[in-house]
Image (cartoon, helix red, strand yellow):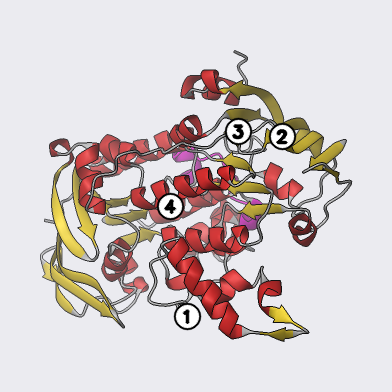
Amino acid sequence: MLLELIKVTKQFPGVLALDNIDFKLNPGEVHALLGENGAGKSTLIKIIGGVIKADKGKIIYNDEEISFSNPSEAINRGIATIHQELNLFEDLTVAENIFIGNINKFFVNKKQLIDEAQKILTANDFNIKAETIVKDLNTSEKQLVSIAKALSLNSKIIIMDEPIAAITEHETKNLFKIIKELKNNGIGIIFISHRLEEVFEIADKVTVLRDGKYIGSGSVDNFSQEDLINMMVGRKIDEMFPKYNKIENKVIFSIKKLKVGNVIRDVSFDVKEGEIFGIAGLVGSGKSEIPLAIYGYIPAKWESLIINNRKIKKIDNPNKALEYGIALVPEDRKSMGLILELDIMKNIIIQNIKLIEKYGILFWKKAKKIAKDEIKKYSIKATSYKQKAGNLSGGNQQKVVLSKVLKRNPKVVFLVEPTRGIDVGAKVEVYNIVNNLANSGNAVIFISSELPEIVSLCDRVMVMHRGKSMGILEQKNINQENILKLATGVDI
């Protein structure tokens, strides 16, 4: 046995995060740790990785009882964690990030540092240059840097927290190849993911937590996908992809010949009232830049832009976009969607300050009521409206972002990777919000890397390849095969 947790318990103020949890990891094993957001997965891996200490219970590692005081102790003993929140130094190079805790032996020779980092990247088929500054990478590439960093530590245990949430299908295959090689070298891997199809592909065993309690574990072969969903959520999910939006004839949004530097060239599309319009494509295709350009985050030009019969010449900042009725739920909710140090109420109100302002005075009693109503409306699991956004689970953070954005009653809503890093139950709730949003008379533009949700939810899908639209698929032609062909530049 490589690692064993026995009756591990952790209490936070007002919350029993872990309640007598047992967990075992063998050498050369991939053990999936599953559960909804708030189930206790993050707390458990933080205890294993030395970020926090358990209140009760034992941790046995290599036949020795251990208790780490900080993450450095865990790393030095051979336990590395790839966190869902990418803990990288944005202004340093890829090479410096990979060796940040072990940089002394290279500090006199920058070329050697870059060469050693490049060996790791090349060996694992990561198409990244070691000398690149991290802030110049996209989210997917940053995830690969975090993985390379963990691989450089020669660890005995690697904890992977949502490692595939932000990477492409090709990169996922490379990662699974790496995981299999790590297994063959006797390394134990704790694998956390909300994508159950990947769990069945790569994991040997699975343990499910719910509300801080141990629900069950065993060989992956002994469970079906439905079994695991029922264990995670404690109920049956009748319909994974609910769809009940109704499309009207009125065009709410229309853009012609959108250009963004050398990234996007002459992209045109329109969206009707009540329509869920999908945009798909591989990483680097330009799909993520489209909403940022129209929302005023990055410079863009267009031949024409019409929103709800109003012609718009230019949008050079997000405030203008909001005035024109455009809303954006961003890809990275932590850096672009929320202020993590502020509470739920302030996060919701900050973009809707006019709702509580009169004659320059802010009425916080009204803000409190709005926050309470929104928490109830979106079923946000929180101790109160005063809870910091940074202390919420991923699914509940996303609901706060949705609440903040939709409170302005926009006409055009861009949803970029809206279910990334959230659990199965929360995904279904988001899909219901999307349907209701469309049925409220909005144009919904849904951008996702998860093809099953694109195929199941969208009425039409535009597929991007190298900054160009390869075509718009009507509903009868929307399937994964057609999307992937267009995404790789193959006409259909």
In the rendered image, residue 212, in percent from the top left (x then y), is placed at 23, 66
Q: Secondary structure at mark 3?
A: loop
Q: Nearer the viewer, residue 195 or 96?
A: 195
| Residue topped by disc 2 | 250
Distance from Cα at disc 2 to Cα at disc 3: 9 Å
Amino acid type shown at disc 2: Lys
Would you say the residues marked 1 and 2 are in contact, meaning their CB atoms lie under 8 Å apart? no
Which residue sits at x=71%, y=29%? 468
Please give the residue where the numbered disc 3 appears in the rendered image. Answer: 247
How many residues crowd around disc 3 within 10 Å: few (fewer than 14), some, or many (20 or more)? some
Which is nearer the N-term, disc 1 or disc 2? 2
At numbered mark 1, what does the secondary structure look like: helix, strand or loop? loop
As rendered, which of 174 and 138 lies closer to the eye? Answer: 138
Q: Which image quarter is the C terminus in?
A: top right
Q: Position of residue 472 (x, y in %)?
A: 64, 24
Foreground disc of the pair 2, 4: 2
Q: Which mark is residue 421?
A: 4
* Residues packed near mark 2 inside 10 Å, few (<14), some (14 to 19) or many (20 plus): some
Which of disc 4 and disc 1 is earlier in sequence? 1
Disc 1: which residue: 386
- In percent of width and height, residue 209 lies at 22, 58
